[in-house]
Image (cartoon, rainbow, N blue to C red):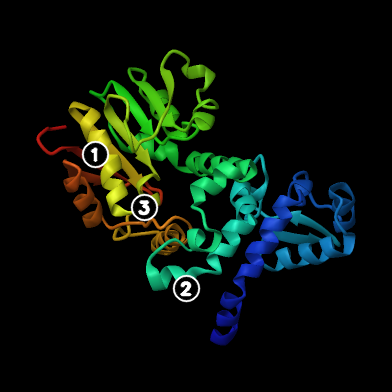
């Protein structure tokens, strides 16, 4: 394509996002799990219009999600992660994309650029967290998305850090506990704890980790359980600087002597994944008023909370591990 055609495609790329997300939400992608089928057969099974389904499949074939096979349509290797049961499935992301509140906030991006504040909150008159509480389906999709994304990164994160010498790990805002579970499975000497909202913690706790796992309901703005190792995965990017300092200060207050705080985030000034990090930064601004940060910005947050950044570890994924210790302690 010419540069102009590339630009035209970029300006209409939201249509591709909507097409993929609709195909997932309607069950059409899952209808192709076992191999190529006609659009008519999948439509009959999914209760969709057969002609409209064919038109959708035709469009998805042009972007490599599907391929046409003798008049039928099948999933490509590129498209298979959209299956609901695929390892590291991205189907929850597709479903969340179609949430009208989330989708419309991006159309309000100019507000965030003008003010630096959340477009979501200005548009809907409530913050994203309150929206999730009021809309259980959105909350489930979000929790499923966090678990799915975690599944692609947690083993690498758990392997990147040496937990020898640690005893009790608290996953702060750990959701369904995917990361701490990976850490415990690699380190038989550790016990673990997940701190999160009650409805999330109740679902946490794999059977194979019984006796080594505790779920605790609470707010990381108020108190975190005592530990010698805190994990904060994709927590700080949700919040502004002052709120991050509050969260880190709660960790500092309960941190055992010689303990560490491990923050898992994208880091803007590190090589690789620049586009992903830059657009995630915009998403944090639009949806929550949060942000991705540079290494120097994280070091400043740690300093303000009475912590000291000691090192940053690559994981082979878009996420790095930032290690901090108490400013008057050693790891």
In whole angstroms, how far apart are the C-alphas of marks 2 and 1? 33 Å
Task: Name the outermost residue toward the top.
Answer: 211
Q: Callout 3: 10 Å neighbours few (<14), some, many (20+)?
A: many
Q: Position of residue 26 (x, y in %)?
A: 76, 51
Q: Quadrant of the C terminus?
A: top left
Q: Residue at x 35, y 23 (%)?
A: 187
Q: Quadrant of the N terminus?
A: bottom right
Q: Is residue 88 visible?
A: no
In the foreground, 208 or 325: 325
Q: Callout 1: 10 Å neighbours few (<14), some, many (20+)?
A: many
Report the disc number at residue 3.
none
Give the residue number, with chain letter if any, for mark 2.
Answer: 110
In whole angstroms, how far apart are the C-alphas of marks 2 and 3? 24 Å
Q: Earlier in the sequence, mark 2 or mark 3?
A: 2
Label 3–label 1 contact, CB within 8 A: no
Give the residue number, with chain letter if any, for mark 3.
Answer: 266
Give the residue number, with chain letter if any, for mark 1.
Answer: 249
Task: Name the outermost residue toward the left.
Answer: 328
SS of the residue under disc 1: helix
94 with respect to 229 (left or right): right
């Amino acid at each position: 394509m010419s540069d102009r055609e590339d630009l035209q495609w970029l300006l209409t790329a939201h249509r591709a996002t909507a097409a993929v997300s609709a195909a997932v939400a309607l069950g059409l992608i899952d209808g192709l799990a076992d191999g190529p089928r006609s659009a008519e057969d999948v439509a009959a099974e999914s209760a969709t219009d057969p002609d409209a389904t064919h038109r959708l499949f035709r469009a998805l074939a042009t972007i490599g999600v599907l391929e046409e096979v003798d008049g039928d349509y099948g999933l490509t290797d590129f498209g298979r992660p959209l299956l609901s049961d695929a390892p590291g499935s991205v189907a929850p992301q597709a479903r969340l994309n179609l949430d009208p509140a989330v989708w419309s906030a991006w159309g309000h991006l100019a507000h965030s650029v003008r003010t630096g504040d959340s477009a979501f909150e200005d548009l809907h008159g409530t913050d994203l967290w309150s929206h999730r509480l009021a809309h259980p389906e959105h909350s489930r999709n979000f929790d499923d998305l966090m678990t799915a994304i975690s599944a692609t990164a947690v083993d690498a994160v758990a392997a990147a850090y040496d937990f020898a010498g640690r005893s009790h790990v608290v996953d702060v805002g750990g959701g369904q506990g995917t990361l701490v579970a990976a850490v415990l499975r690699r380190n038989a000497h550790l016990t673990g704890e997940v701190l999160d909202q009650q409805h999330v913690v109740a679902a946490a706790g794999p059977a194979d980790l019984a006796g080594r796992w505790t779920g605790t309901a609470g707010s990381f703005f108020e108190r975190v359980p005592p530990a010698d190792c805190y994990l904060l995965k994709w927590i700080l990017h949700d919040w502004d600087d002052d709120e991050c300092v509050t969260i880190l200060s709660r960790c500092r207050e309960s941190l055992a002597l010689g303990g560490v705080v491990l923050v898992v985030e994208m880091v803007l000034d590190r090589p690789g994944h620049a586009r992903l990090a830059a657009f995630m930064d915009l998403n944090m601004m639009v949806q929550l008023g949060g942000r991705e940060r540079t290494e120097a910005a994280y070091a400043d947050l740690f300093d303000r909370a009475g912590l000291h950044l000691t090192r940053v570890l690559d994981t082979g994924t878009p996420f790095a591990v930032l290690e901090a210790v108490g400013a008057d302690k050693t790891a």
